[in-house]
Amino acid sequence: MFTNFANVWTPLSLSRDLKPGRPLGLKIAGERVVLFRDAAGQPGALIDRCPHRGVALSLGKVVNGQIECPFHGWRFDRTGANCGVPWNPDAKRDQLGATALPLRETAGLLWLHTGVAPETEPEISESFSLPKMTLCAQSVVWNVHWTRVMENMLDMPHLPFVHRRTIGKALSRTVLGARMDITVEERPYGLRLSSAVDGVARPGVLDYRFPNMMELFIDPPGRRLRLMVASIPQEDASTRLLLLTLRDFARAPLLDPLFRWMNARIAAEDKAIVESSLPPDIPLSGGEVSVRTDAPTLAFRRLYRQRLLGGDARPIPET
């Protein structure tokens, strides 16, 4: 399961997007996953496949906190345990369970582990625990491999070209003849990136949080504003971007659409460019040429190849 994206934690959505009584079907690294809440409101995640005939459980309904298969009415709780097989009261239900996946609800988000036995917990940015922070989110889908999306989020030299009308406007006036230097620092969660132009440090820093999150620190004087992107693989050439904004000002929910519009506009500037990448996923070493300012991209590629590429998660064997 989850080939080339196995045994890692990824955020999926805001907690409030998972409504009681409503299953939520998602695609993660080629696997169908269904989320739902039990009778106590606790979230659970199963591989979205009934062990009986393989149909999508997400097409069914949630009954008393258990998800009911739409085909034959088999029911499963959030641990995957079989809770009922219609017409078969003698069924050995302990051998007829679904595959459960670790799911955590923390920092206002739902986090899924792409394996069955995590050795860690989600690595949560401290931005989520700062006082008086408001979180809003939206999703967009790009038709390209998630690694291309992720490395784009870590790439600084493209700002004055792709984003000359938004976040790259100031840089667009200093490109010709200027020198950009990018500092890449290893951190327990991944990387911290900062930059300078002609020796003058640029404001703000950017974090790469392994495996698939970027956090950009854009703090106005006396305020906090953090933009985050999670690049969630769906299929080989399909990535769902979870765009998050954290802020401690303009906190009224009525203002959320303004921040969503800002994020969507910036993402739209990147979309066509990144989707045109060939090959759709990052090539093997030597498949592209690189220069000094590509250090963040190359650091990400090394981590991807060392820690994710070629790996998959093994489901619990059927008994």
Image (tube, grey):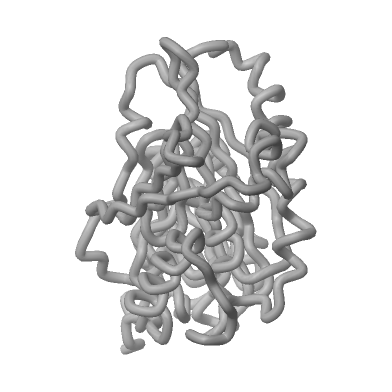
Q: Is residue 73 left or right of residue 99?
A: right
Image: 144 above or below 112: below
> Viewer-proximal residue, 144 or 84?
144
Q: Position of residue 269 (x, y in %)?
A: 76, 47
Is residue 186 in view? yes
Residue sitting at 65 percent across and 45 percent down? 175
> Viewer-proximal residue, 17 or 229?
229
Q: Position of residue 259 (x, y in %)?
A: 65, 26
Q: Position of residue 34 (x, y in %)?
A: 54, 60
Tell me where residue 211 sits by quadrant.
bottom left
Tell me where residue 119 sits by quadrant.
bottom left
The C terminus is located in which quarter?
bottom left
Residue sitting at 32 percent across and 81 percent down? 316
Image: 245 above or below 143: above
Image: 157 above or below 203: below
> Viewer-proximal residue, 96 or 41?
41
Image: 111 above or below 3: above
Is residue 264 in view? no
Residue sitting at 36 percent across and 65 percent down? 8
Residue sitting at 32 percent across and 87 percent down? 317
The N terminus is located in which quarter?
bottom left
